[in-house]
Image (tube, rainbow, N blue to C red):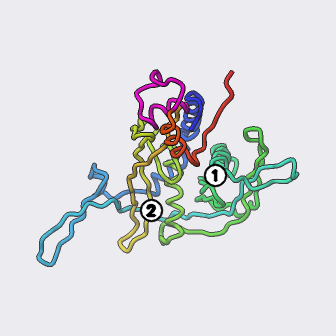
Amino acid sequence: MSATNNKAKEKSRQHETIHQAVNQQTTALTSLVLNTSKEQSTIPKSVQAVRITSQQDMADVIHVNHFPCLFAHDLTFYQYDAIVEEYHEKQNKYISLSSREKRHQFVSNILLAKEIHPTAICWYDEGSCLYSTTNFEDKLPVVYEKEDQGYRRRLTIKSLTATSGTNDLDQSSIRVIETLIKQVLKQQFKVIGSVFYRWDEEPRPDGPYDLLNGFKQALCLTESGPTLNVDTTITRFYPHSDLLPFIWERLLDQRNMSTFNGELSDGQYNQVCNFLRDVEVTTTQSD
């Protein structure tokens, strides 16, 4: 919970600016790799009807959230072992960068600048793997070091660890394609954990919480072929709000701050203490 609305909104705008910068090459590759079937593309709804015939020859229609997928042929994926590190002056050495968001942004900037390869299409899983449709094993290991947000950071691509492709789909190639889809979605949606949310969606108040509609996606390899699974979800968040209005209006369900006389009753105080137990509150010094 933030102590000031302005800082919270500014931080949200900064994240939105970062993730709305779409990597055109990655998006183009996704269009090349992932193609839904013609039958599905004519269905405007987010669910698809599957017809099942029983022994009595009576058809039942079941709506599912699995969408059949087709992939372009003759695409090979190369998986490279990679690490992102940050230099620490006290230890006088590079240490693995722990922040997933910082790793993502640092590597994304390198990929956008085409510093790894002038024509290669690459994407990063934000962990220890870098993927590409280009084999540049002969150039490994490679190190890209640069200053980022006032810190010395570097990306080291160590070795080629695996290859897979669309001609012989297995769990490895499915994981590579799924990682690519998630990276493209991250450029178009707000991501919290593994759930994607629309940037322009207004949260719905629910007592002390705000509710947001989101979705999760997963690529699955089934006996009948690959399917894209989409699950919708509703998540509760604490709102970005000043602490006192949040306590008075959202926790205690009072109309507005004008009715607050500067004191809480013992019952209200205990209610607030119980509710805010283990909740992190950020404060800033006022002028």
Q: Residue 145, position in %: x, y? A: 78, 48
107 to 200, vertically: above or below: below
Q: Residue 17, position in %: x, y? A: 56, 35
Position of 220 compared to 139: left or right?
left
Which comes before the other along the chain, label 2 or label 1?
1
Whether residue 114 is visible here, answered yes or no, is no
Q: Residue 117, position in %: x, y? A: 67, 51
Position of 20 compared to 136: left or right?
left
Q: Quadrant of the C terminus?
A: top right
Q: Residue at (55%, 41%) from the top-left corner? A: 19
Q: Closest to the observer: 158 or 72?
A: 158
**Disc 2 to disc 1, C-alpha distance:** 22 Å
Q: Closest to the observer: 214 or 46?
A: 214
253 to 43, vertically: above or below: above
Q: Quadrant of residue 12?
A: top right
Q: Which mark is residue 205?
A: none
Position of 185 compared to 126: left or right?
left
State the SS at label 2: strand
Residue hosting label 2 = 219
Q: Quadrant of the N terminus?
A: top right
Disc 1 residue type (three-letter): Arg
> Callout 2: 10 Å neighbours few (<14), some, many (20+)?
many
Residue hosting label 1 = 100
Q: Residue 160, position in %: x, y? A: 68, 66
Q: Which stretch appears magenta?
A: 242-264
Q: Residue at (51%, 54%) from the top-left corner? A: 194
Is residue 84 covered in magenta? no
Disc 2 residue type (three-letter): Leu
